[in-house]
Amino acid sequence: MVILSKGDHVWLEPETKGEFNVAIGGRVKFTQSGKIQVIDDDGKEVWLDGKTQIKHMHPTSVEGIEDMIGLGDLNEAGILRNLFTRYMENLIYTFTGSILVAVNPYQVLPIYTSEQIKLYSDRKIGELPPHVFAIADNSYYNMKRYRHDQCIIISGESGAGKTESTKLILQFLAAVSGHHSWIAQQILEANPIMEAFEMPRPLEMTILVDLKSRIVNQAHDERNYHIFYCMLAGLSADERKQLDLKDATHYYYLTQGGDINVEQRDGGKEFADIRSAMKVLTFSDAEKSGKYSKFCLFYFILEI
């Protein structure tokens, strides 16, 4: 029999069994005469009786820890709650030994400054809070120490932040090595082009997804691929006239989802970034003009 008091943290078993159903954390709000009131992590009020299976939460799962190897509840529920607890405090990085788990915050966090690069240089993993710079520094240190090539594996679902993590690692390595190589610069500059060609706007979030059907069919609040919007926003009036292009609102296959504007996105600036990236990637003027012409053909074909 588990003895509970007000304020205790517990694990509640899922109401239904299933592959993706796991225990959820909760806090005891009231106990009396065998009745227990618990507020779970979703804010839901749950009443339990003495027959309900309930388990105390380990102290390490209550506030969350930086390295999940130290979790007392080292199971799926414990890992998920630890990541959730830290995420709610804008702590998006968590170690599992020498592995870094990153949760995409879908916002810009001020944790990638030059000061942070200096802070994480020449430090052992675990000496400072979890950070992608810690992984980059560990790889750089081992390369210098053992004189061997190093490999950092970045895996995750679409939209998890793999491309952004790659950019940050390259940023760190370029800074600490003192050699901002042309190849590294080209890799970094390729990102605006990748995003423009691969990022439609799904409902509620903007993530990297390869959805070919989005070209001819968008649901409510969805957009087509960004390149089609930012090109029209970024071309000068003379360029649009020369290519016989109109405003994005004129094209049916760019407006099916309704409002074509995306918060915190500037199509004109993004197209300027794409042009800059093309220059770094050694696109010739003829090649750039050829790309623009091909997209013009897309606009014309879809309007037939």
Image: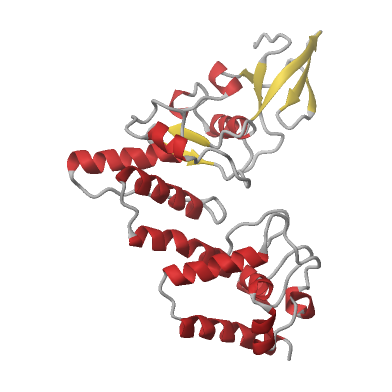
In the image: residue 275, left or right of residue 253: left
- Above or below for 210 versus 12: below
- Residue located farthest toward the left when viewing the structure as drawn: 147
- Above or below for 184 versus 173: below
Residue closest to the eye, 63 or 295: 295
Q: Going 76% across and 21% down the picture, which residue do you hit?
A: 38
Instruction: From the top left corner, tell me how far across and down residue 154 is, in percent.
Output: 42, 50
Q: Going 60% across and 21% down the picture, which residue do you hit?
A: 62
In the image: residue 248, left or right of residue 243: right
Residue closest to the eye, 153 or 22: 153
- How many discs appear? 0
Query: Does residue 294 appear in the picture of this structure?
Result: yes
Residue 172: quarter of image = top left
Q: Going 50% across and 21% down the picture, which residue do you hit?
A: 72
- Quadrant for the C terminus, please: bottom right
Residue closest to the eye, 250 or 57: 250
Instruction: From the top left corner, tell me how far across and down residue 162 is, in percent.
Output: 48, 52
Instruction: From the top left corner, tell me how far across and down residue 178 is, in percent.
Output: 31, 47
In the image: residue 272, left or right of residue 218: left
Q: Going 81% across and 68% down the picture, which residue do you hit?
A: 258
- Residue located farthest toward the front when viewing the structure as drawn: 238
Query: Does residue 199 appear in the picture of this structure?
Result: no
Instruction: From the top left corner, tell me how far across and down residue 57 is, in percent.
Output: 60, 19
- Quadrant for the N terminus, please: top right
